[in-house]
Image: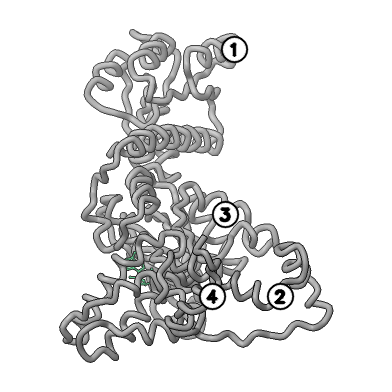
Amino acid sequence: MVPGCDTLPVLLVDDEPNILFSSRTILRSAGIREVETCDDSRLVMPLLAKRNFGVIVLDLFMPHVSGQELLIDICRKYPHIPVLIMTASDELELAVQCMKSGAHDYLVKPVDKTRFVTSVQRILELCNLRNEVHLLKEQLLSDQLEHPEVFAPIITCSKKMTAIFRYMEVIACSRQPILITGETGVGKELFATAIHQLSRLAGKLVCVNVAGLDDNLFSDTLFGHERGAFTGADRPRAGLISQAAGGTLFLDEIGDLGEASQVKLLRLLQEGEYYPIGSDVPRKSDARVVVATNKNLQQMMSKEQFRSDLYYRLCAHHVHIPPLRERLEDIPVLLDYFVTRAAREFHKKPPVSNPELSRLLGSYAFPGNVRELQAMVYDAVARHQSGVLSMDSFKSVICREKTVQLPSPDRDRPAAERLRTLFGRFPTLREMDRLLIMAAMDLARGNQGVASTLLGISRQALNQRLKRQEPPDGR
Ligand SMILES: Nc1ncnc2c1ncn2[C@@H]1O[C@H](COP(=O)(O)OP(=O)(O)OP(=O)(O)O)[C@@H](O)[C@H]1O
């Protein structure tokens, strides 16, 4: 796995030690920790032969080898390393020449601090994206995962999920935030854990569920407080973010974060800074931020319930986990996995499962996804006595009759319209009966046992109806 540019050091090249010192200080205080300096332009190419850098900041007027010569050499031999020119000359002609030779940006000394930091950060982000695209191409062309062991707790045999795992391997080393989305119960926390393990960060994974935290509680939990910050704060408290130093901060249910906390999170992501409650002195954080939600953040943005600047920061990398009904092939493997686990936990011999069970489950939409399947299996195994696992408890959930709300005459019209469109006129009961049976057989992929369960009739009754529907000559 190739590291992201933001994990590689920045190289500052200038013959003036004062400039090197102040530039390094500016970058470090902006959270760019790895900064190397070189005050002899003759040493740059030998250094690059030995080490890789995320970005090079290059002065133009230096003794021995000029910055312009170096720029041409670097762009030819190491085109993947972006170069930022920082010089005293504001000649337009020179700036154009440097950009043509391959420089990413051109800054005139004395350089504005913010402009300098922004430029370096922007180049690093750009370079990360380029690396990511390159790695994605490589990963997508191969079927192999580099670290299959990390994904072992996520039970799946779906190709869609394997493609997501490959994407995760690519982005895990970047320092940008990761947004994990998916319906409730798809396993977002398992994915966050896998990302942390893949990132090989030395620090811990710290998980915080932000749902239900008002702004004060959010700040206190995450950022901590100074002694005397509020009544009862008789001791300082280091927030959870300090526990995530050098590691990953996982914020779950991010869609439930209030407006004021959203602003604080944005500041943390942009500046790498936060304020403990009662303190005017910002603290630095190098924790990698991973967030998850089952809400539709884009929809929330359009209703102004979620800040768009925060959204765009968060979704630098986006992992979307498909719902279980979009990967039906996972049902049999998950079923086996949970049956074995439940039997172990209930100290029972693992029951044999009925082959029809997977098909019956495949006809269900699973609004609660894997969590719901897990609960169904645990319930069935808890009730299990011996032999084959009974399908009764599954049927009672899947075929639970919903109270159909009888529509008012006005609301009735669209339903009648839909039926007319389908049949060309209002259908008879016999036609509806036939349509329902066809749909159930379709969903059950031809299995009469499963189809009869879905229809709420016995297998024999279904069989008789199917016979009645066959044309007399069998055609
Ligand atoms: N592919 C999977 N393999 C094994 N277990 C899984 C898988 N997907 C989910 N689970 C299990 O399902 C349960 C729900 O997962 P998790 O809490 O991560 O869901 P979630 O997506 O965060 O849901 P919510 O949005 O409601 O918080 C957990 O017990 C988890 O271990």
* Nearer the camera: disc 1 or disc 2: 2
Label 3 vs label 1, nearer the camera: 3
Mark 4 neighbour density, 10 Å: few (under 14) some (14–19) many (20 or more): few
Label 2 amino acid?
A: Thr
- 104 sits to left or right of 329: right
Residue 179, position as x, y percentages in the image: 47, 55
Query: In what element is the residue under mark 4?
Result: helix
Q: Earlier in the sequence, mark 3 or mark 4?
A: 3
Q: Is mark 1 within 8 Å of ligand 1?
A: no
Amino acid at the residue labelled 3: Tyr
271 vs 379, left or right, is: right
Amino acid tagged 4? Arg
Look at the image and tell me whether residue 21 can be seen. no
Residue position for label 4: 468
Q: Are marks 4 and 1 in contact (CB under 8 Å)?
A: no
In three-dimensional space, the C-alpha distance between marks 3 and 4, rounded to whole angstroms, equals 58 Å
Vertical relation: 222 (above or below) 298: below
Q: Residue sitting at 29 percent across and 63 percent down?
A: 155
Name the residue tied to disc 2. 428
Q: Residue drawn at (24%, 20%), measured in percent from left and top?
A: 49
* Residue where numbered disc 3 is placed: 311
In the rendered image, which residue does mark 1 sit on? 91
Q: Position of residue 272 (x, y in %)?
A: 45, 52
The amino acid pointed to by label 1 is Glu
Q: Nearer the viewer, mark 4 or mark 1?
A: 4
Quadrant for the N terminus in the image: top left
Q: CA distance from mark 3 to mark 1?
A: 39 Å
Ligand 1 - quadrant of the structure image? bottom left
- Quadrant location of residue 310? bottom right
> Which residue, as the protein is rendered here, is positioned at the far right?
410
